[in-house]
Image: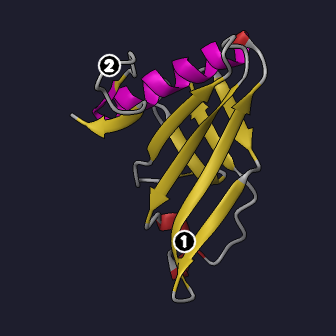
Amino acid sequence: MADGDKAAIQFFRGTDEPVVPDIRLTRSRDGRTGQATFIFEQPEALAPETLGNIAGMWMVDEEGEMVTREVNGKFVNGKPSALEATYTWKTEQDFERFMRFAERYAETKGLGYSNNSGDNEGPNEASEG
């Protein structure tokens, strides 16, 4: 990542994944713990020319990096079609750090996000905007 104010997701250290995931957040009732689930449809990390083992998903920004090792492939007719990664936080500070990354990532990718306020809005997710 060349630009200090940019945020990126990487499956291979030093290589940004260009495919933007669908991101869904869930939090415990007290808000202290939760998970972000990332679903990447047809990510470049699964392209045949990458030929590497995916050991995790790195979320990289100006504050440093966060990593999850919970990355699973989805296959259709024996061919890789998607990656699903889950990032779990256990403290309010971890959640706030994740949200700072998410805001930077959305800005970097030109996205907006919706906040589920309990009315007819959908779940928290990134969408092109």
Does residue 26 sit above or below 87 in this rendering? above
Q: Which mark is residue 46?
A: 1
Q: Residue at x 76, y 59 (%)?
A: 55
Observer-side mark, 1 or 2, equals 2
Residue 1 appears anywhere in the view: no
- Residue span colored magenta: 93-113
Q: In which image quadrant can residue 124 be found?
A: top left
SS type, badge 1? helix
Can you give x and y, in whole percent of width and height, for residue 32 in the image? 72, 14
Quadrant assignment for the C terminus: top left
- The answer to whether residue 23 is magenta is no
Can you give x and y, in whole percent of width and height, for residue 128 in the image? 25, 39
Q: Residue at x 65, y 18 (%)?
A: 95
Q: In which image quadrant can residue 89 be found?
A: top right
Q: Residue at x 69, y 10 (%)?
A: 30
Taking 114 as reference, is 34 left or right?
A: right
**Mark 2 lies on residue:** 119
**Of the residues shown, which amino acid type is indicated by label 2?**
Asp
